[in-house]
Image (cartoon, helix red, strand yellow):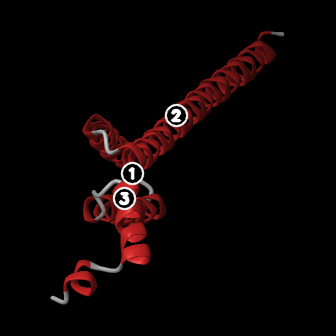
Amino acid sequence: MTTYRAPTTAMALLIVASAGFTSYRSSLQSDMERRWVSRTHLVLESLDDFVTSVDDADAARNAFSWKGDENLLLQYRRDMERSAAQVAELRRLTADNSTQQRALDQLQIDLRDFEKQTEDDKTPIPGRLEASYVAEHHGTPQDRFGV
């Protein structure tokens, strides 16, 4: 009877050790998946904040275009600075993903174009409309004064 006890005990210990190892490995895998899910949520939240900042900047730019209020232009600039900071955060969060880094490169180009368009066109729309109305109904100054 004692001859069977040692192999049986060894087999039982092997089964318990195997179950423990499998449980430990599963726990590590679960922890890693939880970190990925958490990081994905951070990226999605940062992306959502970025979209909100750009929408706010666009709204401030459009309001400035109609009203000419310099405070709206300052709000636009603050929103653009905030969106640039959010792109930097997205870049940090996705540093290990080259596809997302290339997408962020394009996004930064689009943001620069958006800013350039705004900086090139600082005249409020009513002022532009007034100038076009005068030119259309009264001619340009060159036409009226023969200059």
Q: Residues within 10 Å of mark 3 (few under 14, many from 20)?
A: some
Name which of mark 1 and mark 2 comes first in the sequence.
Answer: 2
Name which of mark 3 and mark 2 comes first in the sequence.
Answer: 2
The percent coordinates of residue 13 (x first, y second) are: 68, 18
Mark drawn on residue 45: 2
Q: Is residue 30 left or right of residue 131?
A: right
Gap in Å between the C-alphas at discs 1 and 2? 30 Å
Q: Nearer the viewer, mark 1 or mark 2?
A: 1
Gap in Å between the C-alphas at discs 3 and 1? 18 Å
Closer to us: 116 or 81: 116
The amino acid beneath tag 2 is Glu
The amino acid beneath tag 1 is Ser
The percent coordinates of residue 26 (x first, y second) are: 65, 29
The percent coordinates of residue 93 (x first, y second) are: 40, 42
Q: Nearer the viewer, mark 3 or mark 2?
A: 3
Q: Which residue is mark 3?
A: 111
